[in-house]
Amino acid sequence: MEFKEAVKIALQSLWANKLRSVLTLLGVVIGVASVIAVVTLVNGANTYVTTKFASYGADVFTVSKMPQIITSPEDYQRYQKRKDILFPDFQYVAANCKHCVGIGAQQAVTGKIVRGTQSTTDTSIRGYTWQMPELQNLNIMQGRGFTDTDEEHASHVAIIGTDIQDHLFEGMDPLGQELRVDGTPYTIIGISEKQGSTFGASQDNWVAVPLTAYQKSYGTAKTLTIYVKAGEAGPVLETAADEVRVLVRSRRHDAPGAEDSFELDTNNTLVGFFSIVTRSFGAVAGAVALISLVVGGTSKGHPDAIFDRVRNDGAGRRSLRRHRGNPGGAGNNASRGISFDDCVVERRCRAGDGHRNRNLLRCLSGSKGSATGPDRGAESRVKDGQGRNRGEGGR
């Protein structure tokens, strides 16, 4: 019977306070949905980043003047003071590395591509050595890639991304067609497979030309990035990376014990960094979601709902019956001469609700009369409270 009574009282309380119940339920639903959304977002971001960077190959690492991710202006200024990595440095590593299965170099700028009256802007113009498409896992969908002969003779040939094909060669075959890269003509020999986008930026808006031809247009004094393929991940990759580090340090005359004057990055470095970022974001967003869940599940009604809660709650009913049966009250209230009814009357007097005060007075007077007679003190307090409220309203 106690369980049935508890369920009955709970349902009555929910029905008596429909709006508050709906708002509480809505808050809980929003909080739970927020937690689920944050967990899904973090897991999706980790999967997305891992997939994107893994496409470059788990056995490939890079050597560059600056790291690919810089987190502060101070670090950027410090890295800018380093010496550039130039084409002779790449040739030195390529000639002396024994554990390198493949090695290439790249330079890049942003420029304009023109064909007839059509053009694209903010296009990545890349200078590749002949092995670079393979090192970057660029699959040539049509045509061919570069050869060592193209690189040796600085041939004016180009490989394009699918964005260039869609914008400049819509409805026609681009192979064998000519385009101008910042004013220099190149003949298209290959079209790369679509790469999609990373963080909203297209990975297909690019044109690649042989690095030797690129340097004739843009100069040789700019830094480049060296790509090295170890053949396998794990210990094989570490062995190749150690060998390349020694070669580059000796080439750049880094002092023994000094830190490297260049950056050697693997895919694990980038994936690990983004994992830390997503975990930090998940912790903050998860905390916010949990707070919203707690706040949403905590119902705070209008002050008038306090009396309704006491009236509808089973414990409140039993307390009300005990106080009505025992006007003196018990405990601290009895010692101070304050009963439960006094608290209710005092609240209604302060609220200035004359209609409710009269109803409450009749209720309290009737219940008191059954045991001790009408509560004249309560009646006078109600009237005094109403008089004060009318006096304040007149003023």
Image (cartoon, helix red, strand yellow):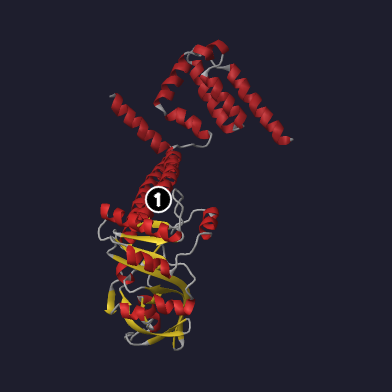
Determine the image quadrant of residue 129.
bottom left
Q: Nearer the viewer, residue 224 or 306?
A: 224
**Residue at screen point 30% across, 57% down:** 240
**Residue at screen point 49% across, 36% down:** 300
- Image height of 312 relative to 367, above or below: below
Q: Residue furthest bottom?
A: 116
Q: Nearer the viewer, residue 120 or 99?
A: 99
In the displayed structure, does residue 239 sit left or right of residue 321?
left
**Residue at screen point 31% across, 77% down:** 148
Q: Residue furthest right?
A: 395
**Which residue does the numbered mark 1 point to in the structure image?**
278
Determine the image quadrant of residue 12.
top left
In the displayed structure, does residue 124 sit left or right of residue 152?
right
Q: Position of residue 305 (x, y in %)?
A: 49, 34
**Image quarter in which the C terminus is found:** top right
Q: Position of residue 388 (x, y in %)?
A: 68, 28
